[in-house]
Amino acid sequence: MTTYLLITAVVIFACVFLSKVSSRLGIPMLLAFILLGMLFGSDGILKIPFDNYAFAEQICTVALIFIMFYGGFGTNWQQAKSVAVKAGLLSTAGVVITAALTGVFCHYALHIAWVESMLIGALIGSTDAASVFSVLRSKRLSLRYNTASLLEVESGSNDPCAYMLTVTFIAIAQGSASGGQIGLLIVKQMLFGIFFGGLIAAAAVLLLKKIKFSTAGFDMVFVVGIAVIGYALPAVFGGNGFLSVYIVGIVLGNTEIRNKRNLVNFFDGLTGLMQMLIFFLLGLLAFPSRLPQVVLPALLIAVFLTFVARPVAVALVLTPFKGKISQQLLVSWAGLRGAASIVFAIMAEMAVETENDVFHIVFMIVLFSILLQGSLLPLVAKKLDMIDEKGDVMKTFNDYSDEVPVQFIQLSIPKSHHWCGKTLKELTLPPETLVVLLKRNGENIIPNGDTRLLENDVLVLSATSPDHVEGVSLVEIYVDENSKYKGKLLSEIPKKENTLVIMIQRGEQVIIPHGNIRLESGDMLVVSKTEI
């Protein structure tokens, strides 16, 4: 037991170290985790014997639950809603088209049996959220035409469709299901996945808003439980657990709930650990000695997938929306394959006997995709003139607090303080500060100019630079061309009881607000929301 724990610690440290090294070398860090697993594996230097597909499938499924949950939780719907329809079509019709074309290629070009060909197509039909997010965030890759949000939503939501196709072709390969049963299987996957996802999300939001956890950190434990039940409950009824948990994640991530910043930080770290675990384990499970036998068919499939199947699927989906050619080409190139494809290949390996080494074929395709497409994505984006120099890709994620230069300052008002007994409008505050909260006798009060300060009051002021104060959270409101706030004075905007605009970000300029500021397209309002 002690030896295994020691090895685990060494692997974690090695993964963290490799993430730094790979970033400097321009190599996607997820590839480094796979290579580290292969180094530790049966054919590697340390020769750790591991070929337990069932154990690997269970561990990787758990890891995928959290990766998919955070894929939804970390997506900023305010930024993504304008591309939601296109992303939804890419994650459904796009996956089906990609899988079908790949299956046809495998059958006619490589002479693989039809069912096995379509199974391979299903396994690699979806793009990988962990890989896409990793490249976008590590390279700070801001893209024109809201393409980053399009890629994030597509890659975060298309695994359920690939999973459904995989389950369908496994059932066909087993010969245990008729056409009607397969149709029922697909309907159950979709309906129960959507139904339970919406139901669990609604219940979770209600509970998180009503319950105040007495012990710090219990809200994180509670949300972990929500993610787990988001997958498990629909799966019990034959529904698509991955679809359900993604829906739960995107609803919770875009709902105003307590302690959200800490939840984002917690799941960011947890998902990072899950990514390290899943890619290391998949590398450990692979046998490098078997790769030469599958390298030719795998590379042929990967080339067809990258340069034919994916571009055709993207063109068919985006052309009706009059998507620019440069955007279509970049979206095509950004179709990275990753952990989900290999995990689904493990499922197929355990469920059916195949003529070809499907697991290692898919494994090689993923290596090719991450190494070639992932490494060259920034260069391709630059060559296609798709880099948005003024944009910030981090704004498309929900870990907003790391990106806005606002901090809170808290101070007490003793009896002897010269502010005691005065109203707020009588005070001379420091430049570029604003009173956002008054704490009095355990209550949180939204102050105004006529609020009079009393002995032992606690004032919370906002200023520039990041920090956090208990009882106050930050929310973004983006003013675009179609926003109802565009052109209005700040004083003309209806105010909610427990909210206050504390900052306006206009390009590179940070503005402390007052009522006479007229809002413009492109403004980002930073609103403090107080728990009363």
Image: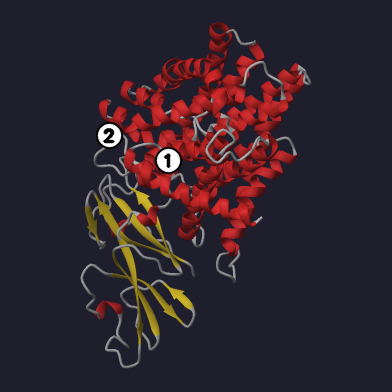
Is 324 placed left or right of 15 in the picture?
Answer: left
Q: Residue at x 62, y 30 (%)?
A: 344
Q: Nearer the viewer, residue 162 or 355?
A: 355
- N-terminal-most mark, 1 or 2: 1
Q: Position of residue 398 (x, y in %)?
A: 43, 50
Q: Which residue is mark 1?
A: 29
Q: Nearer the viewer, residue 265 or 479?
A: 265
Q: Residue at x 77, y 20 (%)?
A: 177
Q: Nearer the viewer, residue 485 or 420?
A: 420
Q: Which residue is mark 2?
A: 387
Is 193 placed left or right of 259 in the picture?
Answer: right
For mark 2, does the 10 Å Cα neighbourhood hold few (<14), some (14 to 19), or many (20 or more) residues?
Answer: some
**Circle 1: residue type:** Met
SS at circle 1 = helix
Q: Position of residue 232 (x, y in %)?
A: 69, 44
Q: Position of residue 465 (x, y in %)?
A: 29, 63
SS at circle 2 = loop
